[in-house]
Image (cartoon, rainbow, N blue to C red):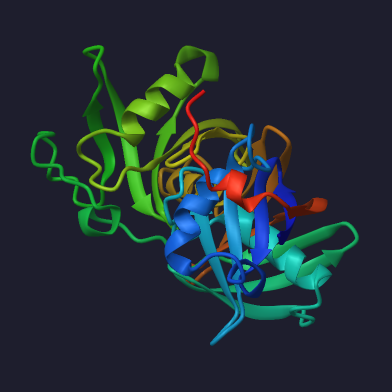
Amino acid sequence: MVLFSKYHGCGNSFVIIREDELSKEIDEAGYPGFARMVCDVNTGVGADGMIVVRREPALEMVFFNRDGSRAPMCGNGIRCFANFCRDERIESSRKYPVRTLAGDMTVEISSDDPFRAKINMGKPIFGPQAVKMDTNDMGNTEAKDLLGLRLPLKNGTDVEINSLFMGTIHTVIFVDDFDDIDVPGVGEEICNHSVFREKTNVNFVKAIDDDTLEVQTYERGVGMTLACGTGACASVVVASMKGICGNSAEVRLKLGSLGIEISGDGDVYMEGPSVKIMDGRLQDLQFLQTTTDV
């Protein structure tokens, strides 16, 4: 039996488990497979990702996508992580660092009821090495920052993409209207395009006004999600660089919004909610760890 909690941030949902709880039943090598099973909507809890709370040697968020792949960071996930740590009395400070594969992120609790947190997400990183991208066959290798590239699609058209590392790998595409593009289909194609050696999250961005963006995201390892925190940050970074918005903007998502601000030194801050959905226990671990064909 393993105790767990489930939280969401603007609809982006996560199963959260203490590592000392999980390690009673499974070793670290089994975390990816366990994440796939626990996130399954039919035979598990159902979620976009799994978060393991590691406390030694430092407080760390260990994050897995629904497909079991490890991701460096998750913006909505780290707010849910902070909410869990507060609920479980793991961390009582209002401001503290959290270790991730993308570096240490600073959490600052901005409200207890309802819970909201502000996260210093660090600085965006540009270039093929950061994005794990091969542009040799694209004919636009002069765009070394990977902004404004034309990416060919299977239907013979192409689309302008802007790629960067913002906690994880992201690609930003601006649209006038979401109905003008097959968001899930194009998102999946770009995510799995051969130029992205480690795939990419794909953010479709519509500018509402100078201070407001609307974003829909196809996440690598998950598919379409209701929200993506790092994607919201990446979208504001690129929109600001292109003069579409200023250094701060509200990002509207399907079930809420996030406040994104770029500081004078280039750090990106994300502020938003987290909601606890439930506590539970995974009772039949043997069933969860058994692969069956349906």
Q: As displayed, is residue 253 above or below residue 258?
A: above
Residue at image coords 83%, 60%? 115
Which x, y percent locates residue 281?
76, 55
Please tell me in which quadrant of the rendered image residue 82 appears: bottom right
Q: Quadrant of residue 42?
A: top right
Residue 194 in view of the camera: yes
**Camera-nearest residue between 245 and 223:** 223
- Residue farthest toward the bottom in the current orientation of the protein: 57
Report the label total: 0
**Residue visible at 50% across and 33% down in the picture:** 292
- Asked if residue 173 lies left or right of residue 146, the reply is right
Q: Nearer the viewer, residue 101 or 108?
A: 101
Relative to the observer, which residue lies in front, 105 or 44?
A: 44
Residue at the spot x=53%, y=53% of the render?
A: 34
State whether residue 106 is above or below residue 2: below
Rendering coords of residue 227 (x, y %): 61, 40
Residue that lies at the very extreme toward the right in this rendered image: 113
| Position in image of residue 231 (x %, y %) | 51, 46
* 157 left or right of 202 in image: left
- Residue 48 is at least partly visible in this image: no
Q: Quadrant of the N terminus?
A: bottom right
Residue 115, placed above or below residue 228: below
Q: How far across and how far down the image is residue 27, in percent?
A: 49, 68
Q: Residue 45 or 59: which is nearer the viewer?
A: 45
